[in-house]
Image (tube, helix red, strand yellow):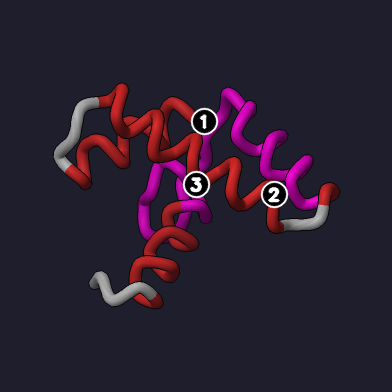
């Protein structure tokens, strides 16, 4: 799952995958340091998952795509 997120970030930001990997790792590490340990564990479990689901909007990443979209809206991206 994490590899799919890296590919999505690389594609959307139009950057190379190694740079996207650094960005994704940075964000995930920051989130895990700020969230309760139990939530960080859930996040790790989700990211280590080999399966994907299709959300109602057709995102191969399931609800994570919806979450990312909502966060983008909060940060001024549409």
Task: Say which element carries label 2.
Answer: helix
Q: Residue at the location (52% across, 35% down)?
A: 52
Q: Label 3 to label 1, Cα distance in Å? A: 15 Å
Report, in whole angstroms, how far the alpha carbon at label 2 lies from the one at label 1.
20 Å
Residue in the picture at 43% in, 70% down: 70
Q: What residue occupies the far left of the structure in this picture?
A: 14
Instruction: Return the residue at label 2.
Output: 33
Regarding mark 3 in the picture, which secondary structure is present there? helix
Q: Which residue is mark 1?
A: 1
The reply to whether the magenta stretch includes residue 71 is: no
Mark number displayed over residue 27: 3
**Residue 41: percent from the left, percent from the top?**
78, 40
Secondary structure category for the residue under label 1: loop
The Cα–Cα distance between marks 2 and 3, rounded to whole angstroms, is: 10 Å
The residue that appears at 28% across and 76% down in the rendered structure is 76
Write down the quadrant of residue 24 in the picture: top left
The answer to whether 54 is drawn above or below residue 51 in the figure is below
Between 61 and 54, the one lying in front of the other is 61
Residue sitting at x 68%, y 47%: 32
Question: In the visual, does 1 lie left or right of 20?
Answer: right
């Amino acid at each position: 799952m994490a590899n799919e997120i890296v590919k999505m970030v690389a594609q959307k930001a139009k950057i190379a995958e190694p740079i996207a990997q650094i960005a994704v790792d940075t964000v995930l590490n920051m989130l895990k340091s700020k969230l309760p340990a139990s939530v960080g564990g859930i996040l790790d479990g989700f990211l280590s998952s080999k399966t994907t689901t299709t959300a109602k909007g057709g995102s191969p990443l399931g609800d994570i795509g919806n979450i990312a979209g909502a966060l983008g809206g909060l940060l001024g991206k549409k």
